[in-house]
Amino acid sequence: MTEVRQGDPVDRALENLGRVAVPVEESVHASRRRDRVVGVLGSALGRVRARRTFARRAWVAVFSVMSLGAVAAGVGVYAKLQEPEAPVIVAEEQWQARGVFGSVVVRDGRGERRLASGDALGIGDSIEAREGASVVLGLSSGDVRLRSGGRVELVSTTAVERKLKIAAGTVDVDLPRKLPKGQALILETPDAQVRVVGTAFSVNVALDANGKPATEVSVRRGTVWVMQRGERRATLNAGSKWRSTPEARVTASAPTPAPVADGRKVSASTAGER
């Protein structure tokens, strides 16, 4: 134990202070002081609780608003997806004789007349290019040339399709640009249907060895579908041909052999449709 030095004034002051009696505070004053301290502490705790409650409620409100927004957006997207696609509105067009070379006649409800360049054609009109003659029938999307000895009938020119029925002869089609979405040019023959949206090709109808109409399709550019009885029989690319006769084959300019198209369903080598 360390001995207290007798002459140290600090030690003596501490010793004297330890002998002094601490007065006891009256209970009334102590109670008042305690009440004030408790009140201050309670007020401070109340403010803290209020701030926490406000913050909690604010976060709940923000989360609720975000949830409602997400639900509303989801409902809107779902409703949009359920809406049927708006139909593509395309103005109807009228076929026109853009170029007449030689003797070409048109038959309609009024009888037969010579066709001249610039004449407008209507549904049901039958056009025949006599020997040595030809005619170019035009729309905004391209041209259809009827060669010598050919006969065609205008079946429809709606906003959805332009349809020609080929009775005989050769028809050359050239559509430099793809038709608008929802449109197609359809060429019907006695035993097939050619559907196209943008390409260049020829369709020939002639009698086979048995005296029955036979169809031959040859594609110069793009892709065409050949249909029979509502089924796709062949998909032809540039350089390919298709014949409807039993012994016919799909031929292409490529050196590799092409699949047979003898009335069965054909999968010709395809690049995607244009």
Image (tube, helix red, strand yellow):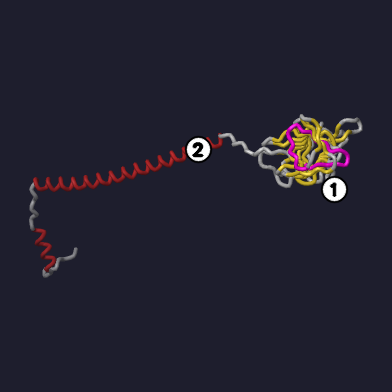
Disc assigned to residue 115: none
Magenta stretch prevailing secondary structure:
loop
Q: Nearer the viewer, mark 1 or mark 2?
A: 2
Expressed as whole percent of the image width and height from the top left, the position of residue 68 reads 43, 38
Position of 2 relative to 248 (above/below): below
Q: Nearer the viewer, residue 231 or 33?
A: 231
Q: Residue at x 12, y 46 (%)?
A: 32
* Quarter residue 10 falls in: bottom left
Q: Residue at x 85, y 44 (%)?
A: 257
Residue occupied by mark 1? 255
Residue 92 is inside the magenta segment: no
Cα separation, mark 1 vs mark 2, equals 55 Å
Q: Amino acid at mark 2?
A: Gly
- Residue stretch in magenta: 117-136
Q: The C terminus is located in which quarter?
A: top right
Disc assigned to residue 76: 2
Q: Amino acid at mark 1?
A: Pro
